[in-house]
Image (cartoon, rainbow, N blue to C red):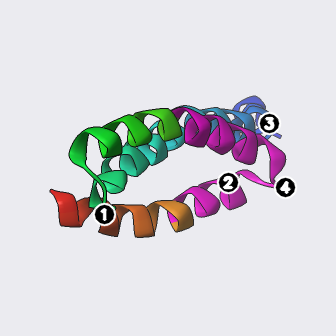
Amino acid sequence: MNPVAGWVRTIGPLLSRVAAALFGGYALAALASVAVLALPMSKPQAVLTGMLASFAIYAGAVIWVFAVRSALRAWTGLLVVAAPLLLAAWSVW
């Protein structure tokens, strides 16, 4: 077996999960903080709620990424959650 292929096979899924945790979790938290503005509440309260919720959502996304069985499921789960948040955030933009 090629040494590079062996390295990618062993380290690749871990690097994919780290990227999903860092970038996917951040994107999910950012989308959630903007999507909260679509809720029927005052703007200052919505901003504060979105900011506070983004910390919990980011932590939950990181835990999710490393708890699922494969890196593909981690990315799929992040995309499934991000789709409705993107629709809600799109209505605010």
**Number of residues whose C-alpha sits closer than 10 Å to that of mark 2, classed few (under 14), some (14–19) or many (20 or more):** many
Count of number-bearing discs: 4
Q: Which label sits on residue 6?
A: 3
Label 2: which residue? 74
- Residue 85 is one of the magenta-drawn residues: no
Say which amino acid is labelled 1: Pro
Whole-angstrom CA distance, mark 3 to mark 2, is: 22 Å
- Majority SS type along the magenta span: helix
- Determine the residue positioned at 73% across, 47% down: 64
Q: Quadrant of residue 12?
A: top right
Indicate left or right for 10 with 48 as reference.
Answer: right
Say which amino acid is labelled 2: Ala
**Number of residues whose C-alpha sits closer than 10 Å to that of mark 3, classed few (under 14), some (14–19) or many (20 or more):** few
Q: State whether residue 70 appears in this view.
A: yes
Dot 2 or dot 1, earlier in sequence: 1
SS at mark 3 in the image: helix
Q: The N terminus lies in which quarter of the figure?
A: top right
Whole-angstrom CA distance, mark 2 to mark 1, is: 31 Å
Magenta extent = 55-79
- Determine the residue positioned at 33% across, 41% down: 45
- Determine the residue positioned at 46% across, 42% down: 29
SS at mark 2 in the image: helix
Indicate left or right for 76 with 70 as reference.
Answer: left
Which percent across, then down, holds residue 36?
Answer: 36, 53
Foreground: disc 3 or disc 1: 1
Q: State whether residue 20 appears in this view.
A: no
